[in-house]
Image (spheres, grey):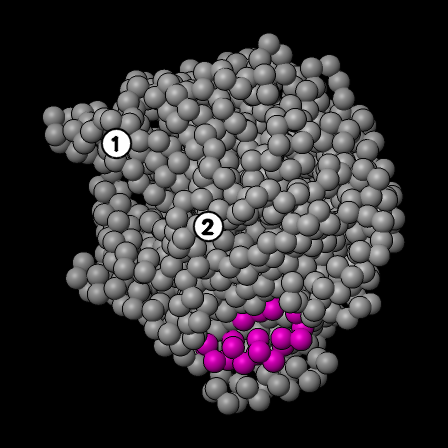
Amino acid sequence: MEERILKMAEKAAAKHGVEYFEIRIARVSAVSVSMQNGQLEGLSSDLERGISVRAFKNGWGFSSANDLSRAEKVIETAMKIAKLSKGNSGIYKGDPVEDRAELAGRIKLEDVDLEEKLKLVKEADKLLQGEKIKNRGTSYGEGTKEVLYLNSVGSEIRTLTSRVRLRLTATAMENGSMQEYWKAFGGTGGWEIIERVDVEEWTDFVSRKARELLKAEAPPSGEFDVIMDPELTGVFIHEAVGHAAEADAIKNGESIFIGKLGERVGIDELTVVDDPTLPEKFGSYTYDDEGIKGRRVEIIKKGILSEYMTDRETAAVLGLEPNGHGRAQSYAHQPLVRMSNTYVEAGSWKPEEMFEEVKHGLYMIGDKGGEVDVASGTFTFGAREGYIIENGEIKTHVKDVSLSGNLLEVLRNIRAVGRDVEVSFPGYCGKGQWVPVDDGGPHVLTRAVVGGLR
Amino acid sequence: MGMEAVDALIGILERKNLEWEIYWESGRSGSFRIERERLERSQRKFFSGIGLRVGINGRTGFSYVTGLTHDRETLEGLVKRAEKLAKVGSVPFRGFPSVEGKLPAIKGLYDSRIEEMPFEEAYEMAEEYSGMMAELKEKKGREYTFSGGLGLAFVKRGLVNSNGVEVGDGKTGLSLWAYAVRKGNGSGNGYHSQSYTGIDGFDEAGKIITKALDDADASYSAKKLEPFSGEVLIEHYTLQSLVYLFLENLYGESVYYGRSRFSTENIGDEVTSEKLTIIDDPTVEGSPGSYPFDGEGSPGRGKELISGGKLRNFLLDHTYGSLLGLGSTGNAVRDFRTVPHIGTSNILVGPGEEGLEDWDGVIVSKVFGEHTANPVSGDFSLTVELGYSVRNGEITPFRGNMIAGNVFKVLKRVSRVGKEMERSGAFYGPRVASELRIV
């Protein structure tokens, strides 16, 4: 079938004068199980096949279908659209690659019975129960994607990638006040990732945190010294630095990082990396969705803005090398420049030394998501909890803390980078499409605006 | 139904001792992306599929297949998967809706010109849109960059269940967005978008770009505002962010599982300012959030969620409506890949009687970071993308501050409601005045 599809595409490309094309044929199987308050809410096990074709001639034409019997229509449509294009973009073609890559882990997800997954969710749900816990939620999700990538240069890449994720949530209530806490685990690989999660320990942690937050105070507001824990460092660096260093924001004249390659943006000790090759992380992959091998990118190296993340198009237009950051949500989406696993490398500070530096500030812990305006560099992100620091000591527990700042200012204000790197915070990043990512880093001390209620 | 696969599936299901529901969809979407005033990428996608829910002994199972053309073996496999999931799991089954009278006739949801539009014509339309941006760039100069997009789509869907419900409809959509960046000694940016159910929405294309441009200019000259607490004017977009945060507490599922601030006992309680009325209405003519039937075949109907500040209704599908003893409000949303879940249709915040044109004080126009807010406690702190400070008629834009507050308190303290309504997608609302902390 593949040969027939490729031949059909080559013929259509010649007919429409298309310069470059690529085809992705995917088979995706997914399982999800979710439970709330002891009641199973969702249980699904699905299989889907689909095809997409992307063609380039000054600009892009793209078409997809979730029905392989429409392959011919999809090929013809993508080529016809590309032919119409009057854009003035470019494309990096590169050399043909023939390869097979598998990131499916040791214990294949399909070899584990659905009953086992159901048992895990039921067990977690039971363990989340506790005093003042009004709501408990557990969700398990897995997906295995087999993709055949073909392009007009002659590449033929077969990849098999499995991802798995478990999320625990608890909502505590007392005297009409409600607070929730959650924790997610996951990665790229097999069931062994789940087996390593100490469900008993973490369910206890999550429900205890929800209860403790009931007693926490509202945070103060204003500009403060802020120490971010590894998880919050991750979301900060993803939102504030990562999105601004995606080369499509540079190419489109939007990012605050335009024209700043080679410039100092932070202290010597600050190195920010995006690396899809980290083993087992949620944002890991071997090849991106444009058939380019993913590689480690040093966005900021020793305080200097060093590299952007690129795809085939931005690399060609900006005169850079493609570094395998063209990712798509599914076969039915066009690849965009995206992050993978983004983190801050280790510095030299012990966390306790950092706390000693803070006379009056906040220690902020856990990721509650964020958003950035890449043009102005203004970002916002939330922490799940925090503590007020007085003269180096951790004091009052605070809740519902959000931070805001300007990317360049907050980077400039980083005073200390810790030694304790952790990259294990699986999540999803939205940019019109959702892709799995991971992020992290060590404890980092900077200054930012805290939007508190006091 | 006139569709072979659906008819065959009904045939298989009718020979079994179970309850069933088939939902199918078929459609096409086309979208165009403009970068630096040039049309750079275009796409056309085809999608179709069948979702099957079965109910056996108080348990439900769901599975789907993509495409609408299937042999008997595939369809039997689909039924087997759904049956297996019902047996393995214990997802509660509360029955499927029955026929509930006539569906509302809602005008203006389907424009045949969108379905019939050849790709070349859609492309020309997108080129016209990018041409408007190029023209504006020419006029405004090198400091400005415009990008944007245009999307056209149609979907046909149908639902049939073992209780005799058999419904189908077609819907079309046009969406437009524009993003303007101004970079000189500083930088500013503005975004505006709108969606429509018919092709005539394109008449507003120029207005959308101009709004993005105006915001970019305001943002360019904006500085941070000195922190303060007090009454501010909350514009349409910020009100939208706050209302959707509040609405998370009205989803039947959250109410049933205790993740909402409210329970059924709170119906009738005063939960916002008496000046506020919030309605969910899928029957608004020509509105992007409208539908004659929801994802379970229940008729779409308008309902007051809040009126005169009092809680009147929750947002419910058949399952949670039944679990809470209230019945469905026709708010099940889905596609063929998913089981129905609760969602909103068109949300309308009722207009007041205030002019609010001559506001002297702080105006918060747009914010971002809504997902960092805590819907259960109601606490939020959001970054101001654009706001204005008006003193004696002099308007000074600001941005980069945060607004902090508690959504329940902010909606409770709404002191004035404007009479002018604005629409963004499926949200309709006025400007309101309430108390906020500007950080």
The residue that appears at 41% across and 44% down in the rendered structure is B284
Let me know if residue A446 appears in the view: no
List x then y, in percent, for residue A422.
66, 38
Measuring 44% from the left and 50% from the top, which residue is drawn there?
A: B106
The residue under label 1 is B419
Question: Is residue B422 one of those drawn in magenta?
Answer: no
Q: Which secondary structure lies at badge 1?
A: loop
Name the chain letter of the residue that bears numbered label 1.
Answer: B
Q: Nearer the viewer, residue A429 or B303?
A: B303
The residue carrying mark 2 is B105
Q: Hey, what amino acid is under mark 1?
A: Lys
Query: In which chain is the residue bearing label 2?
Result: B
Residue in front for this viewpoint, A261 or B419: B419
Q: Quadrant of residue B411?
A: top left
**Side of A299 relative to B10 (left or right):** left
For badge 2, the amino acid type reads: Ala
Instruction: Check the picture and name the quadrant holding the N terminus of chain A.
Output: bottom right
Where does the image place residue B219, in percent across and percent down from the top left? 27, 42
Magenta span of residues: A63-82
Quarter assignment of residue B168: bottom right
Is A376 left, or right, of A319 in this rendering? Answer: left
Q: CA distance from mark 2 to mark 1?
A: 28 Å
Relative depth, front residue between A68 and A276: A68
The structure residue drawn at horizontal position 82% and vertical position 43%, both measured from the top left corner, is B56
Q: How many marks?
A: 2
Question: Residue A126 at x, y = what percent?
Answer: 81, 26
Q: Residues within 10 Å of mark 1 (few under 14, many from 20)?
A: some
Q: Residue at x 33, y 49 (%)?
A: B192
